[in-house]
Amino acid sequence: MDISSSRLDNEGKVESLYMRIPNDDALTEQDCPQTGVDKEVEKPKESMMLCSEEESDDNEDNVLLSKMIDGDEKVEPPKKSMTFSSHEEVISYYKKYAKQVGFGVSRRMIKKTPDGHPRYMLLTCIRECSRVRNTSNAMKPNPTTNRTKCNARICATLWDDGTWFLSKVVVEHNHSLSPSKARFLRCYKNINDPAKRRHELNDRAGIRANKNFNSLVEMGEFENLPFGERECRNFINKARELRLGKGGGQALCDYFTRMRSQNDGFYYVMDMDDNGRLRNVFWADTRSRAAYEFFGDAITFDTTYLTNRYDIPFTPFVGVNHHGQSILFGAGLISNEDTDTFVWLFESWLKCMNNRAPSAIITDRTRAMKNAIVRVFPKTRHRYCLWHIMRKLPEKFGSHDHYNDIRSALNTCLYDSITVDEFEKNWKILIESYQLQDNPWLNRLYRERTFWVAAYMKDTCWAGMDTTQQSENMNGFLDSYVHSKTTIKEFLDLFDNALRKMVERETHSDFDCFNRTIPCVTVFPLEKLFQDVYTNAKFKEVQEQFGTCVSCNNSLLKSEGAISTYQVIETVVVPGNRMIDKIFGVFFNEDEFEVKCTCAMFELRGIICKHSISVLLTKKVTTLPSRYILDRWMKNIKRKYTLIKSSCDAFVGNSSSQRYDRMCKNCEELASLTSESVEYFMEVMKTVDMLKEKYRALRSVVPSQRYHNVSHAVASASCNEAIQSNDGKGSISMATTMAQTLGGHHDSVLTQVVMPVDPTNELSKLVSQQKYEEAFDAALQRCDVSIVYWLCSQVDLLCILSIDPLPLSQVVLLHLLRHLSYGINNNIPQKFGWMTHVANAIIPTDSMIAMHVRPIFNEIYALLNHQQYLPTIIGYELSSIRSLMHVIISKII
């Protein structure tokens, strides 16, 4: 989105943007059983510009405030068949009447037409319901209540001509009324726009909340104000939460501009109101968008973290990678948590992900989020977070005599109900055992059981997630970067650091998978199969199933043709050191080589279960079809997003990413130049297909050049995609040259790539000419550690680094240090000395490398720390390692 959509002042600077402040709902929402229709979601009124006002605006506010404290106009009692022009007018009228008489109003029901417009409405006295007593212990009474089963109400219905009329009116109450005390009812405590403006201006000026409130009291008496000091304090606290802070709006614009300039794939959207003021923001970097292609089958979405802790309404989209770690798919800052805001956010995210909706999504149990998911992701399986449900148990049943028993019974329904029938049976036991038939919270949970009970979720893969735990992991990850005083401006910079650390964590886990092997705990070939292909983290999960399958005893129940049905009895230990048996059913089809268990672990988590393993071992199965070995957990797949340049990292020292980025840009240019001509398009596509086939073959023919060939093959595929998706803009002249070069001479080009070329002659020539920068740059670009070590051995590195001015740039030095660390296990005596000299020459504050020094130094320090404890390290090497570690620490500090 163009930054110009933000409003500019006379000096061309972006105004201080702020999040829209929602008005409190005038009606009190009661916790009562629903009738299958959605509640009305009222759009908040637009807040006023929080800036210095002219004298005329102050006078206008004073007039409005005076009208506010003068009192309300008198209205006649409701009568049947009274007509109104809109449902808002009905609500306004009944509220005025109720306040005049002395009772509160509750909106009990709003039915809507299929297109979402209200057609029926029920407004009642707030004392209409009665509280259900959920404890028999007199020492633990329920909280006091004002419910008296009052039947006063009005029912309003929409006529075909658009007019609303009162179809039912009950004016009698079964309790006393007090017009003078009605102002204390919550439904009448509403702060209007002029009062909000005065409150916030006074707060910005540093006036305390009590004096802020007293400034309004001085204009009239307490009984004339429609709000109290508590509402005043709550509003000020809310207003503070939603401010972007000084420079926050400009920081957002600068951040998005900077990210966009670093990578064209960076995506962001800013939602403005009619006055050009910021309401919501969404953004996602290129790496996140590419990672979604591999791990976007199941995601979590959580809004509770920064809003609750740090007053920043941060909303991340999170999934899991092949190590089971949290991975970010985009994030937003929102000003409201209503349906319209979530619809805007989900639509923005879906467009960012090329309109590819996830198969499954886990969220908190909120009606607004549920409505938005139905509208934006109609085919996505929605699941409520179990943690958010279970944490409400103390609130709902904390005073109940049998609270612990109820919690245990609910856990049984959740985790021990393998089938739908078992859940229904356990739920019936829970309800009848503790007389909970009239509990509204449990009744609503039961009506929505398909959204949170695992027995109903077996048709969808959740990648091992049943809660918003991944979002919580992301939140915990951000905890080390964000504190209670963090502003939006600071948060954006810290957010980049967190993303950079997340990428580094995944890279380190990839390194562990290729550098360390977890030994098998059994001799079964199936376990060895998973050890070879799965990442260490996921192999541990599979290994746990192999290790515990000894607790499973299977027996053949029946066999019909190729399908065998087994009963598997698993012995488990429960609290109290008691042992119980759980029964599962496993179906094995020999013709289709398919195995399925009633526990559905493979369907839910993507990990084959111990019960299936028990049957497979009984059948002496030594291999598995590919459908049971998921690509999302494999370690030997080259995933494209790891080669994509991230917006938060310039990838100093990562030549693979630099080459990939450069090749993608050239492919985009080629697509633009050739897509207008069918002839050129077919010629380029033919050449690209030949290149892809050739480099796929080279991966097995030339192992030493595998790393290069993978990069070329991926980039060629990207060129293929870019050509097919380009809109056809651009000239044709360069396309002709490229088509002739690739189309007419592709064999010679490939021959040049395959033929080994000795680089030492060229490097020796550059060194003899004292072109050290060019020599080391050429060596580093080859991504061959042996070439880098050879060049270091041919020159006096310490002498070169002593020259003033330094002949090597800081970028090359940092690149060189990282490459030398790749060969840290090589038996080269001088390696630690070379690394020490290079590290001493690096200037961490240099603007070209400042943001990359710390992560690279931390990576090298971790390698050295591991290296010093190896038994093969002898005395002088240990001294060199510790000397180098000392240099690295001094540079970081």
Image: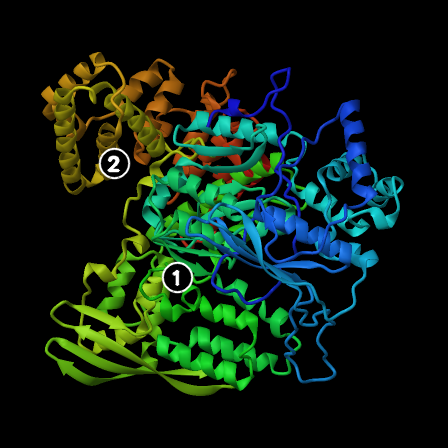
Nearest the viewer among 28 and 676 is 28
Nearest the viewer among 122 and 847 is 122
x and y percent of residue 893 in the render?
61, 37
Q: What residue type is labelled 2?
A: Val
Q: How is the image coloured?
A: rainbow
> For the residues carrying marks 2 and 1, which lies nearer the camera in this image?
1
Mark 2 or 1, nearer chain start? 1
| Lateral position of residue 734 relative to residue 63, left or right | left
Q: What distance separates the C-alpha of mark 2 from that of mark 1?
A: 30 Å
Q: Name the residue under label 1.
A: 464
Residue neighbourhood size for the residue with mark 2, other residues' Cα within 10 Å, grouped as few (<14), some (14–19), many (≥20): many
Q: Looking at the image, is 45 positioned above or below residue 846?
A: below
x and y percent of residue 622 in the render?
18, 69
Label 1: state its secondary structure: loop
Mark yes or no: residue 351 visible: yes
Q: Looking at the image, is 764 positioned above or below residue 860?
A: above
Give the quadrant of residue 323: bottom left
x and y percent of residue 868 in the render?
47, 50
Residue 424 is tagged as none
Q: Looking at the image, is 343 positioned above or below residue 1?
A: below
Residue at image coords 74%, 26%: 52
Residue 714 is tagged as 2
Q: What residue type is labelled 1?
A: Gly
Nearest the viewer among 798 and 136 is 136
Residue at image coords 53%, 30%: 255
x and y percent of residue 845 in the render?
57, 27
